[in-house]
Amino acid sequence: MIFEHTDYKSYLKEAYIQKKNANSKYSQRAFAKHLGISPTLINLVFKGTKNISSETALMMSDPLKLKENERDYFCSLVQLEGAKTPQAKEFMAKKLENLHPAQSFQTIELDHFKMISNWYHHAILEMTELDHFKYNPSWISKTLNISKEEVELAWERLKRLKLITKKKGKWHKTHAFSSIQSDKYHDVIRKFHKQTLEKALESLSSQTPEEMEMGTMTLSIDPSKIKQAKKKMKEFRMEMAQYLTKGKRTHTYQLSTHLFKLTKGDSRE
């Protein structure tokens, strides 16, 4: 996991998130104790207001269960962050490149995969279009019911992918509408769709009929029309997006359409 990061703080946040996902009661204080540092220090590191020393990084390598090459990479990331001169930064960047030559490519590739496979990236991206939006990790965390650390990692990922930009002091999406069409993302796209279906299921018990719309039709069809039906469904989604995004934007919604087969194989006797 360490080689997926170009910033030691994002690595520590992800390590913490993994433990918290495994145990919802797991806290920053428990994580700090596990690493052998103070809760105040880990909090400041997560906020980006303080760095750890090389000595502390080396000490943390054991509880993080880093192998020798991973430890060298982690400690080098810490040294890069603390480098005071351009020459020192360039030296550490070269060292990191030697430790992981494919880092720049893999980071961007991983960013794409993680964004596609985790629903909240798209939600945060779209929330920037809310009339009252201001980047506040605590508010976004509460609004989407995800951890603050997940918000911060997702935000940094959106910035690295250049999907958000700041204009006149306000964050916006770089593109009005975007979609992902690539065979290599097939598995992660399936994971994303599974998550959206889970969110839809949650909405059945948490939202009123006035707040949402769900409808289903069961049809016996001519399969040769599927291709044209998919085209019409895409056109419908775009038409609804253009209609719904006009006027005051105070809430973020998700519009999903599904068409799938209920019968298996050849349904003829």
Image (cartoon, rainbow, N blue to C red):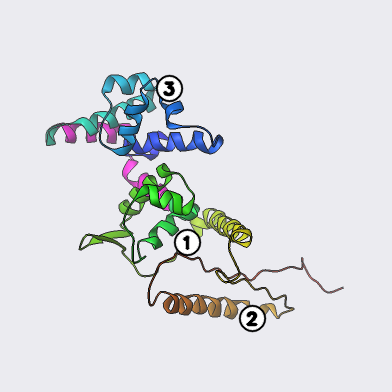
Residue drawn at the location 38% of the way across and 36% of the way down: 11
The N terminus - image quarter:
top left
Marks 1 and 3 close (CB-CB < 8 Å): no
The crowd level at tag 3 (other Cα within 10 Å; few <14, some 14-19, many 20+) is some
Check if residue 107 falls in the magenta segment: yes
Magenta-drawn segment? 88-113
**Count of numbered badges drawn on the protein:** 3
Residue 33, disc: 3
Residue drawn at the location 31% of the way across and 38% of the way down: 47
Asked whether, in this view, residue 119 is left or right of residue 257, the answer is left
Asked whether, in this view, residue 254 is left or right of residue 200, the answer is left
Amino acid, disc 2 = Lys
The C terminus - image quarter:
bottom right
Residue 78, disc: none
Residue lying at the far right of the rendered structure: 269
Residue 225, disc: 2
Amino acid, disc 3 = Lys
Nearer the N terminus, badge 2 or badge 1? 1
Q: Is residue 251 visible?
A: yes
Above or below: residue 152 compared with residue 210: above
Per the model, the C-alpha gap separating discs 1 and 3 is 43 Å
Where residue 149 appears, x then y in whole percent?
40, 42
Residue drawn at the location 72% of the way across and 75% of the way down: 218
Main secondary structure of the magenta stretch:
helix
